[in-house]
Image (spheres, rainbow, N blue to C red):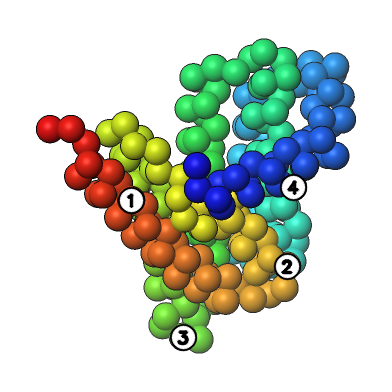
Amino acid sequence: MPKLEIYRQRARSLLSRSFETPIINLLSRVGVTPNQLTALGLLVSIGAAFLATQGHFLEAGITLAVAGILDLLDGGLARATGKSSSQGALLDSLADRISEIALLLGILIYYVCRGSDFWWQPVLVYLALANGFLVSYLRARSESLGITAKVGVMTRSERVLVLIIGLLLGWIEVALAVITIMSIATWMHRFINAWNSLGKAPK
């Protein structure tokens, strides 16, 4: 397992013990289901996207952070309540993609409707979206070929975190540039890893 993935798992384990578990226990007692939590997180993300279209970036960052917390909780709730399922995993993956599209679309709408000062600002939004999706695509395609593809530094979690920080600080272009550059590095890393692994596979 790549060292970076080990660090991610340790961070998630620490977060789970100190934060997730008490909230998950409360949610399970009041009857909230994992799919309901996933749907709520998606709606909150769309709310963040709307705020971004209006240029309310601080509020969008706070709202996106709330959506990120909900996204962290739905998987833990599914495991705690014994409701993990392929359908839930499919819904969660779809919601993740839609929320990412919505937020970046919100920023793009802001640039276009405001009359962007620089031509490269809308282009940067597109590049961040496209390269982020290449990261996810290469993982899915590699795993369909029997190859584990979790290498790289800019997974969806990191992309969301960078966007939250960028929105909160008003450093939108910096956040988009970081996502673009690191996503390119990540999908290239995954491609090379998968290519080499396929080359070693028995004929």
Q: Is disc 2 placed on a helix, strand or loop?
A: helix
Q: Residue shown at 64%/29% (left/top)? A: 75
Q: Is residue 78 above or below residue 138?
A: above
| Crowd rating for badge 1 (residues with CA inside 10 Å; few <14, some 14–19, many 20+) | some
Q: Around disc 4, counting alpha carbons within 10 Å, would you say few (fewer than 14), some (14 to 19), or many (20 or more)? A: some
Per the image, the residue denoted by label 1 is 193
- Alpha carbon distance from label 2 to label 3: 22 Å
Front position among marks 1 and 2: 1
Residue at the disc numbered 2: 168
**Disc nearest the viewer among 3 and 1:** 1
Mark with earlier residue (4, 1): 4
Q: Is 48 displayed left or right of 136 in the figure?
A: right
Which residue is at the front of the view, 144 or 36? 144
Q: Check disc 3 and give the amino acid type.
A: Phe
Tags 2 and 4 touching, CB below 8 Å: no
Q: Quadrant of the C terminus?
A: top left
The foreground one among 121 and 131 is: 131
Instruction: Measure the C-alpha gap from mark 2 to mark 4.
Output: 13 Å
> Which label belongs to residue 141?
none
Which residue occupies 50% across, 20% down? Answer: 87
Which residue position is annotated with label 4? 66
Query: Measured along the vertical axis of the image, is residue 78 above or below residue 93?
Result: above
Give the amino acid at mark 4. Answer: Val
Judging by the rendered image, the residue that carries numbered circle 3 is: 118
